[in-house]
Image (cartoon, rainbow, N blue to C red):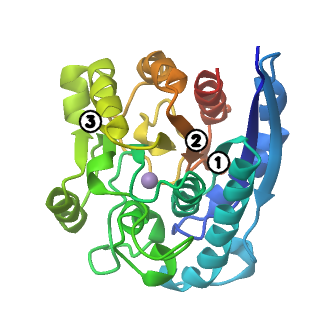
Amino acid sequence: MKQKKISIIGSASGWGARIRSTEQGPDFLNSFGLVEKLTNSLLEIKWARTIYPQHKAAELDLNDVTLALFELVPHIENIFQTVLSELNAQHFPVVLGGDHTMAIGTWSAVTYALNAVQNFGLIWIDAHMDAHTLKTSPSRAYHGMPIACLLGHGVPELVNIGGLGAKLRPEHIVQIGTRSFEEGEDKLLKYLGVKIFSMEEVQIRGVESIMEEALTIVTRGTKGFGLSIDLDGFDPDEAPGVGSPEANGLRKKEVLRVLPKLAKHSQFKAFEVSEFNPERDIEQITAHLILDLTKVLLH
Ligand SMILES: [Mn+2]
């Protein structure tokens, strides 16, 4: 049987958030022994690289979150380059972070490498929409903006990472678990026509039926699809170690049951898990959630 080659890339930055301790996520997962816990005979898995921003949060006093752009842009460009070179080496990339702005680098690289710019599907599991621009965001934190950036809306320094303009099209994006958002971003996604499965809808229909429909959408006419997980999509009981917890989230057991179908799909090209904050974790519950998600998605 052919061995699948997996490359884990750490994004050790919290510059996109007001609470920046997600920068510790990758180092924690490394010392937690994630790679050793994942290795089996069918997988060749390596921790390819952890990308660190120029400064740690403690080294700079940035009261205005928007100033973090000077840290974020080179960091995300680094993610773009690293994911790109892993894909060019025929490795399956897994990006672990780190605040969710890393998604801009991950999906710019995947679409570029696969020659699938604006022709690629993305399932976005998150409590939030992450579709703000500086004009609509009350917090002005960039981790509330990656979906908007990937769709071509927002500050040009982030939108144009890995190539000019939009990397994804709205009709290829599905959000699951949404339950906390502001009017401006909701308006943008509705206007663009992004499919949103709110937490309410997940509770009514069940994760299985939602995931079926999501897979249909992200594979319709695309050259592949990926999965972006923000750990705050899960219930805080099951993912306490996140930057922005929101009550009444997805249940681990149910999500783990439906992910194998996604993982086995021939068009599944990459995934990422973001917003792990080890400082807030309780008895490694969130670290184990990351391990279980990664395990299911890699087999
Ligand atoms: Mn997010």
- Residue 118 vs 297, above or below: the answer is below
Q: Are marks 1 and 2 in contact (CB under 8 Å)?
A: yes
Residue ID at (62%, 34%): 290
Q: Are marks 2 and 3 in contact (CB under 8 Å)?
A: no
Q: Does residue 11 appear in the picture of this structure?
A: no
Residue ID at (26%, 50%): 171
Residue 95 numbered tag: 1
Q: Secondary structure at mark 3?
A: helix
Q: Which amino acid type is marked by label 1?
A: Val
Q: Is mark 1 within 8 Å of ligand 1?
A: no
Mark 1 or mark 2, whichever is nearer to me: 2
In three-dimensional space, the C-alpha distance between marks 1 and 2, rounded to whole angstroms, equals 8 Å
Residue 270 numbered tag: 2
Q: Is residue 211 left or right of residue 163?
A: left
Identify the residue position indicated by label 3 in the image. 199
Q: Quadrant of the N terminus?
A: top right
Residue 296 rendering spot, x and y as whole percentages: 59, 22
Residue ID at (43%, 63%): 167
Residue 200 rendering spot, x and y as whole percentages: 20, 33
Q: Does residue 264 appear in the picture of this structure?
A: yes
- Residue 168 vs 289, above or below: the answer is below
Q: Is mark 3 within 8 Å of ligand 1?
A: no
